[in-house]
Structures are given as structure tokens and as C-alpha cells.
Image (cartoon, helix red, strand yellow):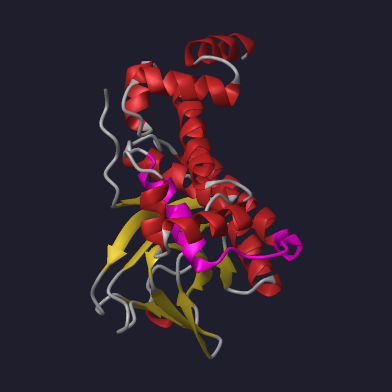
Amino acid sequence: MEEKPTLYGSYGYRFSDPMLQSLAQIWSLGWDEQTSSLYDWDGTNRRDTGKYIFQYTISGKGCIEIDGLTHELTPGQGFIVNIPGDYRYYLPDDSERWEFIYLTLYGDVVEKYWNDIQKEIGHIIHFQPDSEPVLYLLNLFEMAASQQIANAHQASGYAYQFTMKLFTYCSNLEKRLSQWPEAIVEASMYAMNHYGEEIGPDEMAASSGMSRYHFTRQFKQYTNQTPIQYLTDIRIKKAKELLLNTKYSSEDIAVLIGYKNANYFNKVFKKVTGTSPGKYRSSTNLSL
């Protein structure tokens, strides 16, 4: 069984196809944790001009100064900015750490949609942890970490897809009735980042800072799912992806998604989907 990619890492791409560069292309992406006040980026002094940054907070807290205001960037908060630009983002003195995932793109398509989003929504955007842009970026990071982004056409396609998902999400923001509280976002991100470990509602509650009873009630209120249902959904979605795109056995997949053994994984998978992992793999492959 292959090892999972390391959690933190940074990946840069310098593809030379001029046509794809003018459309949409990846410059860099990564998953990082900063604990020093030396982390401080001034948008007016950046050399890598003509780039467009998306950065999403997973845990901890950062800050960005933009348009004369200072915004705290807590879990669930993302920002988009252009390089160069009149802004500064940094680890503030009252924060011990800032964990985030980021993507830097370039190209005419990216510029157009970045500017449209900033005009209509602004620079600061709240994302639910299971929103499409966040899920897509997390998956893109896994691909980068396992060296699956291999050529300019592939990378350009990913850059374009992310841009479209981000624009679609932002276009629908006004339709959202409410935003999840920070504690619920914390727990949701914890589940998404640690589903491969033997975690459950107790660990999710602890990550939120609430008691198990209060957390369970709050979580159900905002997500319409119990914590275990939410965690199970994440695991089964990942299992489906592995069944379709890898040759891993049920034993391997069980370990990768946080279950003790294949028997338990098979039982949960069948309860959720109505079929066994083996039948799901074979029937889906036959229909392709």
C-alpha cells in the first residue's frame, strides 16, 4: 500500500506553453502552518507580478489588512488578492499559529474572474468546509503531493476548473441563509483533515471547544447531520474515489479512511450505498 502524502508541503510549477499561460495556469500551491511573526507579506513589494492568490484558513488565526480595514482570518475564512496589490497578510501577535492551504494562479481567465469576484463579493469570503472550492483544492493538493500534476495542459485544466468553482460558489453566496459558527467550522475541518485516523464525535467535539452534548446539538442544527453521519459521509466519498481510481483492496481502503478493518468498512459502505465495495467498483467500471 502506498503512503499518504505528507500533510504540509509547497509545490511550484513553471510550465512554458504561452497559450495556456494566457488562459489559466498554476504557479504554486501548498499547505502550510506558520508560528512566527516573521510571516508577513506586503502586496506592494511582491516581485511575482501578474499572479492571483487564494488562501483558506484551516485552523488557528491570521490577519489581512486591505481597503483600510483589518480582517481576522479564522477557520472557514478565505481571501483572494492580486499581485501586486495594496494589502498585507500576516500572523498577528495574538495568534500562536495559522494553518492554511493556498493556490496561486495566473492567466487572463483567472484575472477576469478574480476581479469580478472582488467587485461583487470583496476580498474576504466565508466557505463551508464541504464547499466545492475547498474540496477541490484539498484534492488538488493531494495530487500535487503525489506528483500527479505532470504537464501544462493538465495543470491549466485544474486552474480553470478551480476558478469556475470559486466563481460559481461566490455567485451563489447571497442565496445562503446563514453561515456556520466558527466552532462548527473547526469541527468540520478537523473531520476532513483527520478522517484517515480513528476519530469520532468525541474528537470532533474537542476540536470545537464544546462539550460533547452541546456540540452534537449545535452540529445537527447547522449541518442537518449528526457528527458521525458527517464523518461517515466524508469517509465513504473518499472510499468511492479510491475504489474507482486505484487498485487498493478493501483492507487498504479501510485503513486509509480510518476504519479498523475491512469487515467494518464493508458493513458501513453497504449500509450507506446499498451495495458492497466490490460490487460498486465492478458495476461502476462496467458503466464507464
Magenta residue span: 171-195
- Residue at the image position 43 percent from the left and 56 percent from the top: 212
Q: Nearer the viewer, residue 211 or 130?
A: 211
| For residue 61, side relative to residue 188 (left or right) | left
| For residue 45, side relative to residue 33 (left or right) | right
Q: Which of 83 and 102 is in front in this view?
A: 102
The image shows residue 45, relative to residue 160, as above or below, that is: below
Tell me if residue 14 can be seen: no
Figure quadrant of the N terminus: top left
The image shows residue 50, relative to residue 198, as above or below, that is: below
- Residue at the image position 55 percent from the left and 56 percent from the top: 217
What secondary structure predominates along the stretch shown in magenta?
A: helix
Counting from the top left corner in percent of width and height, residue 224 is at 63, 49
Counting from the top left corner in percent of width and height, residue 73 is at 46, 73
Figure quadrant of the C terminus: top right
Counting from the top left corner in percent of width and height, residue 9 is at 29, 51
**Residue furthest front as drawn:** 213
Tell me if residue 7 can be seen: yes
- Residue at the image position 52 percent from the left and 71 percent from the top: 81
The image shows residue 161, relative to residue 257, as above or below, that is: below
Q: How many marks?
A: 0
- Residue at the image position 46 percent from the left and 35 percent from the top: 235
The image shows residue 70, relative to residue 154, as above or below, that is: below
Counting from the top left corner in percent of width and height, residue 70 is at 48, 86
Q: Nearer the viewer, residue 157 or 256?
A: 256
- Residue 199 painted magenta: no
**Residue furthest right as drawn:** 175
